[in-house]
């Protein structure tokens, strides 16, 4: 018998068909035609409204965060904030006092970055203060980011060539009803397979929240068995780069849900698929290859143990 955790379920928001009320073939065909026509009209109208509401991205905010001594690998040329025609670009680096020596601040400013100091969250028994603070900044956009039409947020151990990445991201979203771009996970695992990698292989990365992760996996399994959610491989995303509209209510509500659960679960990628679907967030997914090719995406050259807590 196939493991229900590995099953692929269709879009949970697709309307079901009621077969309990038979109709004549001719009436059925007419009703279906009218229903389909009205549905397409409504869908087209909603899409045009959404596109009109979101069109013409002209203000872009770049957001990085360094909480404690985690991920940061210094400043290179890719930190340079570009000057682009018809696009206002501003970059903000959110840091804690213990993250970076103040003597480095002039270098960031020379690259076009504004420094904003943030206070730390109080850690929980499952998630340390540094990690929880990073999740707050990532998933509940600070007020400074709300002035932009589009925000590009990414970890300090990832790099983008902003000069080509910004026009690429704008081109993907400007004429779309989607509110975000998310990076597909390169492994192609289901959400359950991904969680299991941490529970049984990379165990050091969920040490303090393992029991909570096991409980969460059971909850996700129940959701998938009821066919209310899809946790197949097409729903697993990396969150080291996020491109989103910072004032969209669905994104903001989804982010608050993720941050709340991050108090008990160390890995936000375990939570993201559920949160996206529960808030019906309309997004586009992009591959690592497309990020490499069109956005100049780079990871750090050699993986190494991260400074500070691994929690």
Image (tube, rainbow, N blue to C red):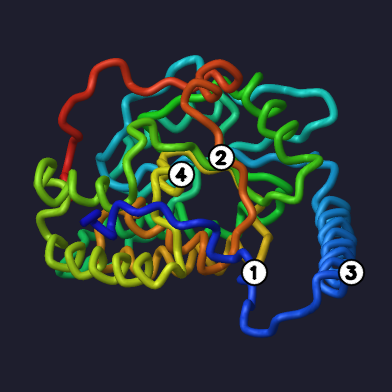
Q: Nearer the viewer, mark 2 or mark 1?
A: 1
Q: Position of residue 64 (x, y in %)?
A: 47, 40
Q: Are marks 4 and 1 in contact (CB under 8 Å)?
A: no
Q: Earlier in the sequence, mark 3 or mark 4?
A: 3
Distance of label 3 from label 1 (alpha carbons): 19 Å
Q: Nearer the viewer, mark 3 or mark 1?
A: 3
Where on the picture, by quarter, is residue 209?
Answer: bottom left
Of helix, strand and loop, which one carries label 4? helix
- Disc assigned to residue 30: 3
Mark 3: few, some, or many residues within 10 Å (few <14, many ≥20)? few
- Which residue ends up furthest to the bottom in the rendered image? 21
Q: Position of residue 98 (x, y in %)?
A: 28, 46
**Which corner quadrant holds the N terminus?**
bottom left
Position of residue 104 relative to residue 69, above or below, is: above
Distance of label 3 from label 4 (alpha carbons): 35 Å
Q: Earlier in the sequence, mark 4 or mark 2?
A: 4
Name the residue carrying label 4: 234
Examine the rendering and report whether any part of residue 63 can be seen: no
Q: Earlier in the sequence, mark 3 or mark 2?
A: 3
């Amino acid at each position: 018998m196939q493991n229900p955790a590995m099953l692929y379920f269709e879009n949970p928001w697709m309307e079901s068909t009621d077969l309990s009320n038979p109709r004549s073939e001719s009436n059925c065909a007419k009703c279906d035609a009218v229903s389909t026509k009205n549905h397409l009209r409504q869908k087209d109208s909603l899409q045009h409204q959404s596109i009109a509401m979101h069109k013409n991205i002209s203000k872009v905010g770049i957001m990085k965060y360094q909480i404690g001594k985690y991920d940061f690998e210094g400043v290179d040329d890719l930190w340079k904030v570009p000057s682009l025609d018809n696009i206002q670009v501003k970059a903000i680096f959110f840091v804690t006092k213990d993250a970076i020596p103040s003597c480095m601040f002039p270098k960031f400013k020379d690259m076009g970055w504004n420094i904003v100091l943030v206070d730390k969250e109080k850690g929980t028994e499952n998630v340390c203060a540094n990690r929880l603070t990073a999740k707050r900044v990532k998933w509940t956009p600070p007020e400074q980011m709300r002035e932009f039409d589009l925000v590009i947020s990414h970890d300090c151990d990832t790099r983008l060539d902003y000069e080509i990445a910004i026009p690429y991201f704008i081109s993907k979203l400007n004429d779309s009803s989607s509110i975000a771009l998310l990076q597909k996970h390169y492994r192609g695992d289901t959400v359950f397979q991904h969680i299991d990698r941490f529970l049984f292989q990379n165990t050091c990365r969920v040490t303090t929240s393992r029991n909570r992760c096991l409980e969460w996996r059971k909850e996700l399994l129940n959701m998938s068995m009821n066919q209310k959610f899809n946790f197949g491989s097409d729903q697993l995303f990396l969150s080291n780069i996020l491109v989103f509209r910072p004032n969209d209510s669905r994104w903001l509500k989804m982010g608050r849900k993720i941050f709340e659960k991050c108090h008990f679960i160390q890995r936000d990628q375990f939570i993201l698929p559920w949160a996206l679907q529960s808030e019906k967030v309309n997004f586009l997914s992009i591959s690592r290859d497309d990020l490499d090719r069109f956005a100049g995406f780079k990871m750090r050259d050699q993986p190494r143990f991260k400074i500070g807590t691994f929690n």
